Each structure stands twice: as C-alpha cells, then as structure tokens.
Image (spheres, rainbow, N blue to C red):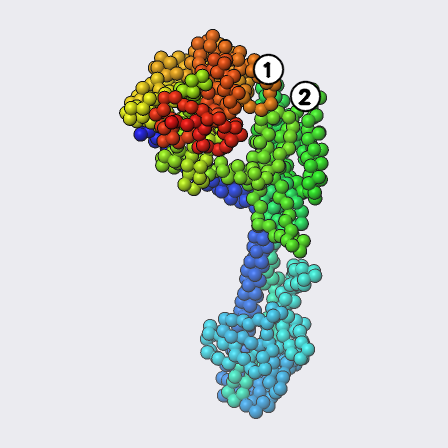
Amino acid sequence: MIDNNVKKTPDKHADKILAAQKHAEKVRKKNEKLVKKLRKNRWWLSFVMFILTTIFATVLLAIAALWMISYTVEDKIQNEYQNVQRMARIYDEKSEISDSDAYKALRYEERPFYVLDNNGQTKCSYGKNTSIESSGYFMVSTYEAGDISLDEDENIDFEDEDLEEYVDKNIKYQEKNVVVYLDSESEYLQQNDKGEFSVDIMKLFGIDFSLKEGLNIDFTTSDARVVPFWIEIPVKEGKLVAKSSVVVEAKDTAFVVIAVLVYVFIILVGFIIAVVNFVNNLKNHRRVNKLLFTDMATNSHNWTWFLYQGSNLMRRWRNADKNYAVMDFDFVKFRNFCMAHSVQEGERVLCTVDDVICSHLDRKELCSHNSSAHFAVLMKYDTDENLNDRINGILRELEHIDDTHVFSYHVGVDKLNVMYDENGKPIKRKNIDIEKAYNNACAASATLADNDDTGIAFFDEKLLEEQRWLDIVQENQQKALDNEEFVVYYQPKYDPRTNELRGAEALIRWQSPEYGFVSPGRIIPIFEKNGFITEIDHYMITHVARDQKAWLDKGLKCVPVSVNVSRAHFIESDLAEQIRDMIDNEGAPRNLVEIELTESAFFDDKKALINIIKKLKGYGFSVSMDDFGAGYSSLNSLKDMPLDVLKLDADFFRGETDGDRGEIVVSEAIKLAQKLNMHTVAEGVEAREQVDFLAEQGCDMIQGYYYAKPMPKEEYEGRMTSPVAKVEEQPAAEAAKEQPAAVVSTD
Ligand code: C2E
Ligand code: CA
Ligand code: CA
C-alpha cells in the first residue's frame, strides 16, 4: 500500500484549498456588499430629513398657535361672560322690586343691552342693538367648555344654525346655556357666499398668510384690537343680551411672534445642518469612491471599479442588439522591465498603457488596471473585423509607448455576441457574469504565454472544454488515486540485436469509470502544474515495486522497469530516501527499478540534482536521462551528471529529417553515451530499418511501437515468460495504431 504519510498530505492539502476557496468566496461576497453599500450615496437623506422636520415643526407651531389663540379668546370671553352674568343677577334682584329699578341698575353699567320677555318682546334696552340676528334668533358662536372648533380657514366657526351652548364650569353662577351673538359692526367679521358671518381670527391677531406671500405678522400694531359681541343670559321671564368685547392687545400677539421666531430659528438651524450634512456627505462619498475605485499603480480605475461598472452595464445591455468583448491585456515581461529599470519606471509605463487603452475607448466602454501587468477592458463592437481593427489599433500604439523599447502584449478576448433566433430577432441573454468573461479572456491570453511576441487569442469552445477538463481532473484526482483508478502500463524495451526483453517503462493510464480510458498526455501536464504529480510518481514507484516483487515471487525473469519522476520532486532534498523506502517497503530489489528524469529537470538546481542522482545510485538504483535531444541541448548536463542510461528522444526517429544527418547525430549520441559509460535506449522506434540501424550503431535497447506499445501488466507478464522475443514483420503504420496491440509474439 501507499505510505500513509504520503496519502494523508494531499487530503489535508485539498481540504485546506477547499477551505481557502470557500473563505475567498465569502470575502468576495462580503466585499461586493460593502462596495454596494459604499456606492449608495444618500445625499438626499439630509434634505428629506429637513423637509420632514419642517413639516413636523410647522404642524407643531400651528397647533400651538391655535391652541394659544383659542385659549386667549376663550379666556377673554369668560371674563366678559362673568360681567354680563353679574348684570343678569342684578336685573333679577332689582326686577323683584320694579322693572324700572332693574333697568336703571343695568343702565348704570353703561353697557349696551336689551332685555326680551318670553315672547321675544323687548322689555327695555340701552345703546344701539348691533347684534346679528338670523331667522328670529341671533347668530351665535359655537363654543363648548374648554374647546374650540375650527373650520378649514382656521377661523372659529360661528355659523351653526341653532343656538349653541357656551358652558363654563369655572363660573360661580352655574349657568349652562350661554349664547353669544356676533356684532355687525365688528371690523373682524367676514361673510361667506351664504351670507353667514364668522370672526377672522388671523386678521384679529395680525397674521397674514398666503401661499404666494408666505407668512406675514404685523408686529408693529401696538393698538388693541377690539371684537364686539353680544352675550345672552337667561333672566326671570326672559333673557338679557348685553354687548361685550374681546380685546386683543399687542401682548396677546407676542406669543405668536415668539413662536414664529423660534420656528424660523429652528428651521434655519435645521437647514444649515442639512446643508452642512449634504456637503460633508458629498465630500466623503467622493473620497470613498476615489479610494475604492482608484488603482494605486496607474492612478486610474481599478479592478473593483471594472467589476462594479461592468456588472451594471452588462445588466443594462444584456438584451441590447450589440456585441461586447471582455478582454485581458497582458503586458509581456513586465516584471523583467521592472527588474531592469525600477518599479517606479514600471508603474509609469503602466500609467501610459492605461492612458492609451482608455483613449481608444468611447464613453461607455471600460478599462481598468487589474493586477501586475494585466488590464481589463470592456468594448462594444459590430463585426469581428471591427473588433480586430480596434484591438490592433490599440496594440500598435501600445508597442511603441516608449522610444527605447518595443513592448509586446498578449490579448485574450471573450466575445459576448448577440445570438439571433430564426426570425432574426436577438435572443434574450441571461445576466452576463463579467468576472467570468474576464476569466475566460485571461484563459485565452494564457495560451500565448510561451510566446514573447504580441498576440491576440480568442476564448472558444475548445478552451472552454480544456478548462472543464482541467476542473474534472482536479476535482477527481484524489478520488481516482484513492480508488486506484490509475493503472500502470508497461512498455517493454528490447535489445535490437537479440530481440530479447531487456527492460520496460512504467506509464500511467487513468481508467475512469466516468470518463473512460484517459492517456497520460491529458492528465500529466495538469498534475505537473498543480503539484499532484508528486503523488502520482509515488503511486507509480510503489506499484511498480509491488508488481516486480509479485513477479519475482511467481518465479518470473524480471527486468528493470523505469519510472518517470517529475522535476517537481527535486525540491525535496530527501527524494532519494523516499524512493528507497518506498521500494524497500514493497520488498522489491532496488536494481529492478530505474528512475527516469526528463531533460527539463536538468535546468533546475543543478547541485541538488547531482546530489540526488548520486544518492540514488548509492542506494543501488539506475538513473536515466529521458527525452535526450528534445528541446534544448543537454550535452552540458551529461558532463556533470553521473547517469546510467541515455534515452534518445522519439523526435530523432520521427518526421522528415534528413536521413543521413539524423543518422549521424544518433550514431554520435550513442558513441558519446558509450564513452561516458552509459547505456542507450531509443524511444519511439516504429520501423524495421530504424531497428536495424540502431542495432548496428550499438544501441542497447529499443522502446517503441515496433516492438510493443505500452500494455497492461497481465500482458506484460506474458512477455517476461518468454526469454527471447521474435519480431513479426509488420508495417509501421499498422504498428502505430492505439494499443494494446503488441507486435511481438511471445511464443
Ligand atoms: P515519455 O516518458 O517520453 O514516455 C514515452 C511515451 O512515448 C509514451 O507515451 C509512449 O506510449 C510513447 N511511445 C513509445 N514508443 C512509441 C512509438 O513508437 N511511437 C509513438 N508514437 N509513441 C511511442 P505515453 O504513455 O502517452 O506518455 C506520455 C508522457 O507522459 C510520457 O512521456 C511521460 O512524460 C508522461 N508520463 C506517463 N506516465 C507517467 C508517470 O507515471 N509519471 C510521470 N511523471 N510522467 C508520466
Ligand atoms: Ca519516460
Ligand atoms: Ca521519453
């Protein structure tokens, strides 16, 4: 089984990654909310508050003023009522003596009055009767104890048809029915269309209010304003009606004046607070926006701004009859530029890049600096040519933003085209995720990573497929490893002179219950990038050692099997010990396992590599250099590395190279290896002539379709039982078909 320590680490690692992703998603959502909150400008709030406060204060003021007015008027009527009541009592007392005594006594008061008997006949009177009479009765005011009723004009309503009571509980002589008539000579009377009268309270208090002119209070009038009226008190066998008056003096108006002044003061303070608040709000809002949406490097817009504006635009434009493209502009080798110059110089260039891109966009298109040397762009376009022209226009300018350098850029584009239905109508789009679109654009620009020249790459279905596959592999890798879905295939290596089995290479295959048979070309590059390759290599070494041990136990004639060890491993200083322990744990002899290092591994830390190779050799393993001749020359590596086997890359035997020159190189490579005491293995050999040639040159082993394709272990087991392999004649094209068709018979 696989070492427990080795198995647990990726689990923990995966958990950590998952937790980190969840956390990142949470933080992102939180930040989005925060941005939305910060973006909301509630500048109107202070004004709304102000208006509400004003309305509230006005209502409060009106209620207070009316209450004060009614209180004052009522108080004054009460005083007068007492006086008239006193006259009524005097009349009652004196009339017991004689009517003329009573009349005399009343005249003595010098208040105009008249006394009516129960039939409405005037018994006696003094002064002019100016009371307002209506349908046999006098017009009366509508008073109830301690209350005052108002009509819409804020005037005390004196219009009721029947006599109403003025009940005053504070008055000594408990008279209940008190009737008040208006005086026709009062200058504060107003008459409506029906001919009814009422007292104009506003006029009385010197208050003038109109929507046009606003509130106007006559503060200057110090004269008292007199409102005459008549009070009716029942007397024995009739009623006494006497003239009274309410006098409104300047001091009575004073409270209204004070209230209005306080009101104006409050409103003014409220208004000032609202304005100050508004200005502060606006300033803060601008500051926050600036901080939130400004990129520190370019001093222009940042990624948050792009996301915010882009999402808004996409929401609005999603059903518009327009094509959009989200792009990633990547400044190639920006880091190199910064290292060669300075970070400040780099930032200066980034500013210019930002300026140039922005200058090519119209008002509603977006550009922001994303990270490091990446710029996000949102552009509208009509046709693909139009889009290409615009991008090329930007790139032409960007390449020459500096007199001394020609810069290059990688542009990734995700086109968000309008789709049309069969009637030629645009199909409604779902909400477009701008972040996803930018991610796609980045994925497209990343495909240009190996090229230093300026280029444009478009995101398409193939790339999407690749991304999906990447997701599938990453999601399933651990599960596949745990369930042993990875199987070891063996590709035999034969001696071209004797056709004898001399060795094999272990090659991985993924037999997925969901995705079928997957070749290493589709998974190994992904594992190399995400680091899972180290788990795979451990898995392969362990399984190969286990198989070798089982075959030995069966009594088979085992040959060394090489296992690929990725360069990612070489950062582990105890790699040699790890490999040794894994093989020892399985009980397989060390000389039956060979370690293959790819050429790329030789470009890493040379010293560490030599150290590990020496240790591996010391523990009894063979070490081979894989893919020799592919890519860069590795002659120099041969000089320093104490390797056992040189594997000539399949490239030597492929394609239309000049036959003679190719043969010279291969033959010299074999000689070189021999001089360095190394064995040689030729990979990817498919033709009989190649085998013959290699045998002639002294190549030790051949690993290629000519002899056998990689095969499952059961099939490989069959190869070991036969000491000598006999090669059947077969055309190379036939041999190249997908495995597991072997061309070597093992009879
Ligand atoms: P490689 O190590 O160079 O393995 C040789 C590849 O060449 C194998 O491809 C093999 O099937 C193929 N091959 C051998 N002879 C011929 C031939 O005559 N004609 C043609 N056309 N191809 C031939 P495979 O199995 O698809 O593996 C591809 C690569 O994946 C390997 O190249 C190796 O770099 C990597 N790989 C496979 N298994 C593992 C593994 O377990 N660990 C690591 N780290 N890498 C592995
Ligand atoms: Ca290999
Ligand atoms: Ca190889």
User: Within 8 Å of ligand 1, the CB of disc 2?
Assistant: no
Mark 1 and mark 2 lie on one chain; the one further toward the N terminus is 2
Which type of secondary structure does the marked residue at label 2 adopt? loop
The residue identified by callout 1 is 661
Which residue corresponds to mark 2? Answer: 405
* x, y percent for residue 626: 47, 20
Asked if residue 63 shows in the view, the reply is yes
| Callout 2 amino acid | His
Q: Quadrant of residue 741?
A: top left
- Asked whether 396 or 78 is in front, the reply is 396
| SS for callout 1 | helix
Asked whether the beta carbons under mark 1 and mark 2 sit within 8 Å of each other, the answer is: no
Asked which quadrant contains residue 389, the reply is top right
Could you tell me how far apart the alpha carbons at marks 1 and 2 are, in whole angstroms? 40 Å
Q: Nearer the viewer, residue 488 or 308?
A: 488
Q: Residue at x 41, y 16 (%)?
A: 623
